[in-house]
Amino acid sequence: MDPNRRSILATGAVLTAAATAPRVFAQQAAQGALQFYQKGDVRIRFREVGSGFPLLATPGGGLDSKMSNWDNAVINAMEAFKNDFRVITMDQRNATGGESTGPVPVEDPCGNCIGGSFALKLMERAPDRIVAGVLSQPIGHRPENPEVMYNSGRDSWAKAFRGRRPDVSQQTIDQYLHNLYLVRPDFVYSVSREFVRNCQTPMLVLPDDTAAHAYQTAIDVASLAPNAEVSVYPWKDPPELKARTITRVRNFLKAHLPATAAR
């Protein structure tokens, strides 16, 4: 097996780093072509551009994380890094407007989550497969507004999903959102602070401060993770500062490539 396919960088709008199954994206297609991966009752639509070491790019958008969101992302990873990596992105399953589908996993809800939390969960589950991660604008729990993410999922994603999938009960959706956001009402939802404190995977954190993107959570991740760096904040404006931040992301990812893949 090609060792480059055993590990992967990743980035998204939350930019993230994570690993993928070695055969999921093994088939080559025309650059930028939409493709599908099917396993059981899960069907994932994905796209890849560029060449080189794999970079998994997770779009932002909460439970509506899908490829078309890159057009309005603060960093369009597909464009920004296509000359440096083989950039792979996808519609998260069951996202409104996307074409990835699958069951609603009430007992294992993280599979439909966005960048930062998604990447940290992958770091936890497959630490030997993840080279490095960039968490841009990571979501996080807000003690002063503890149900903000739950309410967003209920009021937006859930209504659209029920329209497409009337076979899934409201009770199932409510339980799914509860397990996703309220069972662990702290930090990044998907992993514990203790895990991050002991996680050796290099990370670069780009903080934000909105209702969904808790600034304190981003700082906590950067403070706890032993091999984490954090950007200045704010970093999106002016354009010159944003350009320097993108360059820093690129340099960070390249610095952590395996020796056999570094160019």
Image (spheres, helix red, strand yellow):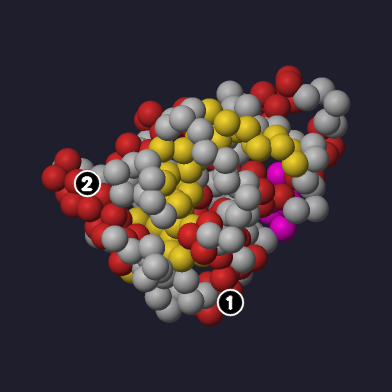
**Amino acid type indicated by mark 1:** Glu
Spot occupied by residue 97 in the image (x, y as percentages of width and height) = 58, 24
Spot occupied by residue 115 in the image (x, y as percentages of width and height) = 50, 50
Indicate the secondary structure of the residue bearing disc 1: helix
| Location of residue 117 by image quarter | bottom right
Asked whether residue 52 is in view, the answer is: yes
Which quarter of the figure is the N terminus placed in?
bottom right
**Local crowd size for mark 2, using a 10 Å CA cut-off: few (<14), some (14–19), many (≥20):** some
Indicate the secondary structure of the residue bearing disc 2: helix
**Amino acid type indicated by mark 2:** Lys
The residue lying at 43 percent from left, 64 percent from top is 132
Q: Is residue 158 above or below residue 218?
A: above
Q: Which mark, by number, is residue 194?
A: 1
The residue lying at 64 percent from left, 65 percent from top is 125
The residue lying at 70 percent from left, 27 percent from top is 161
Residue 182, magenta (yes or no): yes
Spot occupied by residue 128 in the image (x, y as percentages of width and height) = 57, 71
Q: Is residue 43 left or right of residue 25?
A: right
Spot occupied by residue 121 in the image (x, y as percentages of width and height) = 60, 61
| Location of residue 205 by image quarter | bottom left
Which residue position is annotated with label 2?
A: 242
Q: What range is drawn magenta here? A: 177-183
User: Upstream in the sequence, badge 2 or badge 1?
Assistant: 1
Residue 185, magenta (yes or no): no
